[in-house]
Amino acid sequence: MPVYEIEQYELHTMTYRVEADDPADAIVRLLDGEAEAMDNTLDFVEVADERGMLVEDHPELAEKLRTLGVPVDDRIIPSIRSISDVESETLYSLEG
């Protein structure tokens, strides 16, 4: 049986610490890369179903998922960035 590696889009939070004059300045410094990530604060929020592989690039995979009961619209395969067959090195990805 083949083995697959799957990249799934997920939302996480991370806590950062930064010196700043006020909250707006702190946010600007964070966005500029000046904040320091706090250890052990990465926290899973949810699967990011609004992103995914394009159905137009992988119509056969999308149809197979639909027949297996996975809700796939006409635009994306929800939350999946890529899937690859480890042995054959076949890659299905966002890029097509």
Image: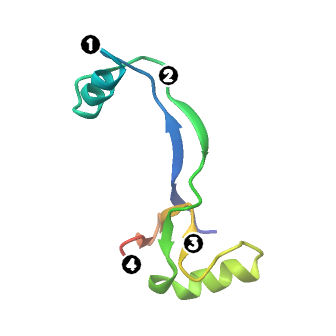
Three-letter amino acid code at the position of disc 3: Ile
The first of marks 2 and 3 along the sequence is 2
Q: Nearer the viewer, mark 2 or mark 1?
A: 1
The first of marks 1 and 3 along the sequence is 1
Three-letter amino acid code at the position of disc 4: Gly
For the C terminus, the image quarter is bottom left
Residue 41, label in figure: 2
Q: CA distance from mark 2 to mark 1?
A: 24 Å
Q: Nearer the viewer, mark 4 or mark 2?
A: 2
Residue 77, percent across and down?
57, 72
Q: Residue extending furthest right?
A: 69
Q: Which residue is mark 1?
A: 21
Q: Which residue is mark 4?
A: 96
Relative depth, front residue between 38 and 20: 20
Residue sitting at x 58%, y 36% = 44
Q: Which residue is mark 3?
A: 77
Q: Examine the image and state in which quarter residue 19 appears.
A: top left
Relative depth, front residue between 12 and 86: 12
Q: CA distance from mark 2 to mark 3?
A: 30 Å
How busy is the neighbourhood of tag 1: few (under 14 within 10 Å), some, or many (20 plus)? few
- Disc 3 element: strand
Q: CA distance from mark 1 to mark 4?
A: 46 Å
